[in-house]
Image: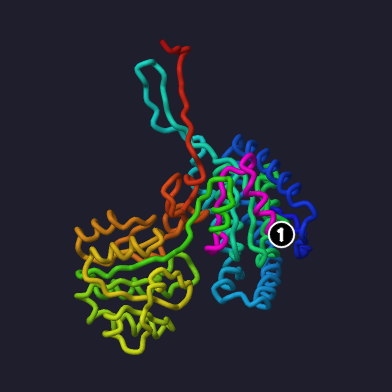
Amino acid sequence: MDQEPLNMTLQVAEPMNDINTYCTKLGKQARTASRQLAASSTGKRNTALLATAEALISNLDKIESANHQDLVAARDHGLTAAMLDRLTLGEHGIATMAKGLRQIATLADPVGSITDLQYRPSGIQVGKMRVPLGVVMIIYESRPNVTIDAAGLCLKSANATVLRGGSEAFHSNQAIASCIQQGLAAAGLPKHSVQVLETTDRAAVGALLQMPESIDIVIPRGGKGLIRRVSAESQIPVIKHLDGVCHVYIDDSADTEQALNIVVNAKTQRYGVCNALETLLVAQSRATELLPQIAERLQTAGVELRGCPLTCSHLADITTACEEDWYAEYLAPILSIRVVADLTQAIDHINHYGSAHTDAIVTRDFSNARRFITEVDSSSVMVNASIRFADGFEYGLGAEIGISTAKLHARGPVGLEGLTSQKYVVFGDGTIRE
C-alpha cells in the first residue's frame, strides 16, 4: 500500500488558552467515533492496523528523529537511566511496534461473540455478547511504544482512544500519531477513533478525568505519583497497578541450576520494568548452598545486594536491608534478599510486602507449587519460570494495555478481552411473559 509522506513538522506543545473547551470537544469527538467503531467490521479495523504498521516502517527515519529530539531534551533535564531506557525507540523498537500491530490484526476479534446461550422454561433464549467498553483514556509516561500498543488494542476491540503521553515523549508520540491517522484513513475509519493530546498542559488530564459522559475507563501507566493522582481525581473507573514489587521464592526442593537461571534472568534481563525481580526469598535449608552462587552471578552483572541478617551472615560486604527495602520497587540494579524458614513464611512475606503484581516459586514439590499459586494473592503467579514472562505478548494477548492488580473487571495483563464488557442478549419468537 502506498503511503503519503507524514507531516513531521513538530513543535513543542504550548499551553492552550481554554483547556476545558479543548477537552470537551475531544471527548465528544471520541464518543461519536466510539459509536462508529462499534458498528465497524473486523476487516476494516484490521486494515487500519496493518496500514499503520506500514506507515511506521516507511517513516522510520522521521520517527527516530522525533525520538532523538525527545531524548536530547530528556538528558538535559536529568531524567534517570531507567526513564531514558523507556523513552528510547530506535529502529528495533519501531520495528517491534509494527510487528505488534500485525500480530494484533491476526488475533480473534472478541467483539460481537455470543456465549452461554441457553433456553429458559419461558421459551426465551438468553446469552451474553462481547461489546466494546466505549472510550478508553490511557495516561502514560516515557514509553512512546505505549501509544501504538494502546491504539492497536483499543482499535481492534472497537474502542475509541484518548491518549495522553508524558511531555518528555511529546515529539515521538506526535510522530506515531501521524502514522495512526494514516492507518485510520486507509481503512475509512473516523479520524477521532484515536486522539493523542496535542498539549502537555497537566490541566488537560484533570479536565478529562471529570468527564464520565465522554470517557468510560481510564488506564494510568507510570509512576506512583501519576497513578495516585488519577485514582484520587477521577470520576471515571480506573484500571491500575501502583507498584511492581515482585518476588521469587526458592523452595527447599528447587533445582539449583533452574533457581540460579531464573533469579538472574528475573533481575537482570531488564531493570526498569514493573515485572523485574525486586526481592528474592530463599528457603533456609538452601541458603548456605545457593546464596554465594547467586551473589557471584548478580554482583558480576553489577547488581547491588541488600540482605536480611541471615543473608548477611552468608555474604560478606553487602548492605543490610531495612524495612523500606521489602516494600521497594527499585527499577534499578538493586536486589533485596531474605532467608525464610519455609514456604509459609515466604507466602506471608509476599502477601504482606508485595504489590499483588507477579510472584514465582522455584520448586520440584508439586504440593508446594499448588499451595503457592493458591495462597499468593497476586495477579500472576508462576512455577519454575521467570517473572519477566508477566507480559501481554508472552501470554498470547498480542500486546497489553497495562497490568491490573485490581480484582474487578480485569486482572493481570489486560489484552483484547479486558477491553470489552458483556451485555445480555435475549431471543424469542413472539414470546411474552405469563
In the rendered view, tell whether residue 372 sits above or below residue 339.
above
**Can the viewer see residue 399 in this picture?**
no
Residue 282 location, x and y as percent?
A: 27, 73
Q: Residue at x 75, y 49 (%)?
A: 22
The kind of secondary structure element at disc 1 is loop
Instruction: Specify the quadrant of the image occupied by residue 340.
Output: bottom left
Q: Is residue 179 left or right of residue 288?
A: right
**Can the viewer see residue 190 in this picture?**
yes
Residue 390 location, x and y as percent?
A: 42, 60
Q: Is residue 304 left or right of residue 229?
A: left
Q: Residue at x 65, y 53 (%)?
A: 206
In the rendered view, tell whether residue 91 sits above or below residue 159.
below
Between 244 and 5, which is closer to the camera in this rendering? 244
Decide whether residue 210 is among the magenta residues: yes
Going by the numbered disc 1, the residue's amino acid type is: Asp
- Disc 1 target residue: 201
Residue 189 location, x and y as percent?
A: 67, 42
In the rendered view, tell whether residue 417 sits above or below residue 4.
above
The number of discs equals 1
Q: What range is drawn magenta here?
A: 201-226
Few, some or many residues within 10 Å of mark 1 (<14, 14–19, 20+):
some
Q: Residue at x 39, y 31 (%)?
A: 116
Quarter of the image that includes the C terminus? top left
**Residue farthest to the top, as pictured:** 434
Decide whether residue 73 is among the magenta residues: no
